[in-house]
């Protein structure tokens, strides 16, 4: 697996994690746990120039392709 493939896999996992928080309250996830999830996502993206919203929208693909 190349670094690019690894990065895309990580971003896809972060996207799925972000989407899963939308149903979190219905599955017994507390507000504190949900806050911890968002904190973790933002920490993982810190310094990359990619926001959580970019991940959800798939906009990170444009950012990655620019680097080539």
Image (cartoon, rainbow, N blue to C red):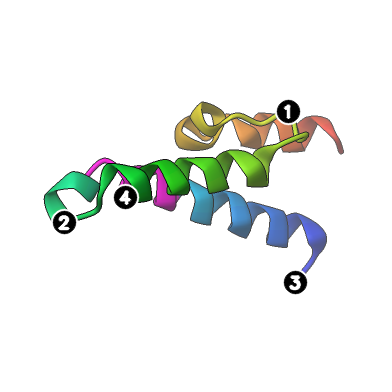
Q: Identify the image quadrant of the C terminus.
A: top right
Q: Nearer the viewer, mark 1 or mark 2?
A: 2
At x 59%, y 49%, the residue is 11
Mark 3 Cα-neighbour bin, 10 Å: few <14, some 14–19, many ≥20: few
How would you classify the magenta stretch by its main secondary structure?
Answer: helix
Q: Which residue is mark 1?
A: 49
Is residue 60 inside the magenta stretch? no
* Spot occupied by residue 14 in the image (x, y as percentages of width and height): 51, 50
- Looking at the image, the residue that sits furthest to the left is 26
| Residue stretch rendered in magenta on the structure | 16-23
What percent of the width, then of the height, locates residue 5? 70, 60
Instruction: Residue 20: give its label.
Output: 4
Circle 4 SS class: helix
SS state under label 2: helix
What label sits on residue 26 in the rendered view?
none
For the N terminus, the image quarter is bottom right
Is there CB contact under 8 Å for labels 1 and 3?
no
Image x and y of residue 12, in percent: 52, 52
As drawn, the label of residue 27 is 2
Q: Position of residue 3 (x, y in %)?
A: 80, 60
CB under 8 Å between callouts 2 and 3? Answer: no
Which is more toward the observer, 5 or 15? 15
SS for tag 1?
loop
Would you name the residue on which mark 3 appears?
1
Question: Badge 4: how crowded within 10 Å, few (<14), some, or many (20+)?
Answer: few
Question: Relative to residue 66, is residue 30 drawn left or right?
Answer: left
Which mark's residue is nearer the viewer, 4 or 3?
4
Looking at this rendering, what residue extends furthest in the front direction?
32
């Amino acid at each position: 697996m190349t670094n690019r493939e690894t990065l895309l896999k990580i971003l896809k996992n972060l996207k799925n994690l972000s989407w899963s928080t939308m149903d979190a309250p219905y599955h017994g996830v507390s507000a504190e746990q949900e806050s911890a999830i968002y904190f973790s996502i933002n920490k993982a993206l810190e310094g990359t120039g990619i926001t959580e919203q970019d991940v959800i929208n798939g906009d990170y693909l444009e950012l990655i392709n620019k680097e080539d």
